[in-house]
């Protein structure tokens, strides 16, 4: 069910989400891999860099009235070991360089211990032989 909703959200992205995705996708930002509209628990996050355990959320105008829900969502994600950055549509569209600089800065910080364990587990997998 959440996977289907995530697909719908990818098709119905906002202008701000499309604008930011154009700068995050395909390793374009500091050579880090991002996914968009990914389910995590009961939530679907806008953008995630799984290797650095970073989530980037783009909040539309309606989020001003959802402060408590956004805070609970952020706390839930942080409890799973993710760093969460939130930006308004206006920031993404009008202050793109500043937004990207904040994301780069967060990417430069060490990932959580959970992320370290996941990365080392993936690195220790034997390569497939063909």
Image: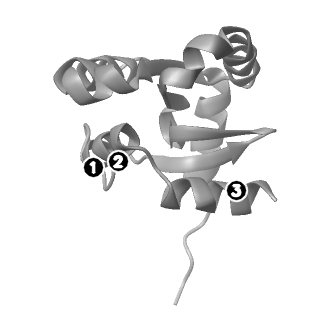
C-alpha separation, residue under disc 3 versus residue under disc 1: 21 Å
Which one is earlier in the sequence, the residue at label 2 or at label 3?
3
Q: Residue at x 72, y 14 (%)?
A: 75
Q: Nearer the viewer, mark 3 or mark 1?
A: 3
State the SS at label 2: helix
Quarter of image, res 80: top right
Q: How is the image coloured?
A: one colour
Give the residue at mark 1.
22
- Disc 1 + disc 2, Cβ < 8 Å: yes
Q: Residues within 10 Å of mark 3 (few under 14, many from 20)?
A: some
Which one is earlier in the sequence, the residue at label 3 or at label 1?
3
**What percent of the width, then of the height, locates residue 39?**
69, 47
Name the residue nearer the viewer: 65 or 36. 65
Give the residue at mark 2.
18
Give the residue at mark 3.
5
**What percent of the width, then of the height, locates residue 83?**
56, 20
State the SS at label 1: helix
C-alpha separation, residue under disc 1 versus residue under disc 2: 6 Å
Q: Residues within 10 Å of mark 1 (few under 14, many from 20)?
A: few
Q: Nearer the viewer, mark 1 or mark 2?
A: 2
Q: Is residue 88 left or right of residue 1?
A: left
How many labels, in total? 3
Name the residue nearer the viewer: 122 or 79. 79
Q: Residues within 10 Å of mark 2 (few under 14, many from 20)?
A: some
**What percent of the width, then of the height, locates residue 102?**
31, 17
- Disc 2 + disc 3, Cβ < 8 Å: no
Quarter of image, res 3: bottom right
Q: Residue at x 60, y 38 (%)?
A: 45
Q: Residue at x 27, y 49 (%)?
A: 22
State the SS at label 3: helix
């Amino acid at each position: 069910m959440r996977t289907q909703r995530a697909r719908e959200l990818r098709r119905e992205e906002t202008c701000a989400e499309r604008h930011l995705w154009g700068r995050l996708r395909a390793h374009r930002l500091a050579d880090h891999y991002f996914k968009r509209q990914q389910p995590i628990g009961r939530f679907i996050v806008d953008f995630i860099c799984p290797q650095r355990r970073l989530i980037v959320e783009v909040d539309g105008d309606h989020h001003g009235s959802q402060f408590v829900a956004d805070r609970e969502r952020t706390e839930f994600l942080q409890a799973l070991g993710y760093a969460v950055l939130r930006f308004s549509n206006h920031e993404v569209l009008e202050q793109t360089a500043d937004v990207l600089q904040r994301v780069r800065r967060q990417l430069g910080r060490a990932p959580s211990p959970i992320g370290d364990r996941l990365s080392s587990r993936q690195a220790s997998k034997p390569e497939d032989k063909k």
